[in-house]
Amino acid sequence: MIIRTHEDAENDAVDEEKWISRRYTLRADGMGHSLHETYIKPGKQLHMWYKNHKETVLCIEGEGQIEDLTEGGKWDLKPGVLYALDKHQQHILSSEKGMTVICAFSPSLVGPEDHDEQGSYPLLDDDGTVLKR
Ligand code: 9YT
């Protein structure tokens, strides 16, 4: 069994200008998905397009908005509301006052992924080699 605390996840945290993400599980854990807690900083807007991954996101604290740029639509996010990018939709995630979400990525992130200019993560091999951009 894998047990991780918030403090453990701090060690795999990524602190960016617009968000902080604590990666609780990653590819090396072999779960078929990686699970992250992401805090969207107040007043930030993130344009993302996960071309190589599917992502499910559950809001657990704060509030924000999700806009689907591929299929259209804009929804308010608050604790208990989930969105799932089942078709690699381009989207804008924003929060005026800050928001915490739980995200599951499939395939799992390996760890070193960084958003490219389109807001996508490359598909990595287990050893971190780029398989697809
Ligand atoms: C909300 C969202 O899209 N989070 C993405 C995960 C986060 N950027 C990470 O852990 O890389």
Image: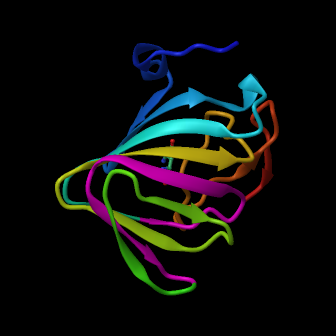
- 58 magenta-colored: yes
Q: Is residue 7 left or right of residue 30?
A: left
Which of 110/84 is in front? 84
What residue appears at the point 19 percent right and 61 percent down from the top-left corner?
Answer: 96
- x and y, in percent, of residue 46 in the image: 39, 62
> Looking at the picture, does residue 121 appear above or below residue 30?
below
- x and y, in percent, of residue 108 in the image: 70, 41
- x and y, in percent, of residue 16 in the image: 37, 43
Q: Is residue 18 left or right of residue 101?
A: left
Quadrant containing the N terminus is top right
What residue appears at the point 50 percent right and 53 percent down from the top-left corner?
Answer: 57
> Looking at the picture, does residue 59 appear above or below residue 47?
above
Q: Quadrant of residue 26?
A: top right
Give the number of callouts: 0
Which of 41/120 is in front? 41
Q: What colour-coding does the image apply?
A: rainbow
> Looking at the picture, does residue 112 appear above or below residue 74?
above
- x and y, in percent, of residue 73 in the image: 44, 84
- 69 magenta-colored: yes
Quadrant containing the C terminus is bottom right
> Looking at the picture, does residue 64 appear above or below residue 101?
below
Q: Quadrant of residue 55?
A: bottom right
Q: Start and end of the magenta stretch?
A: 47-70
Q: Is residue 87 left or right of residue 3?
A: right
What residue appears at the point 67 percent right and 67 percent down from the top-left corner?
Answer: 86
Q: Quadrant of residue 47?
A: bottom left
> What secondary structure do most residues of the magenta stretch adopt?
strand
Residue at the front extreme of this rendering: 80
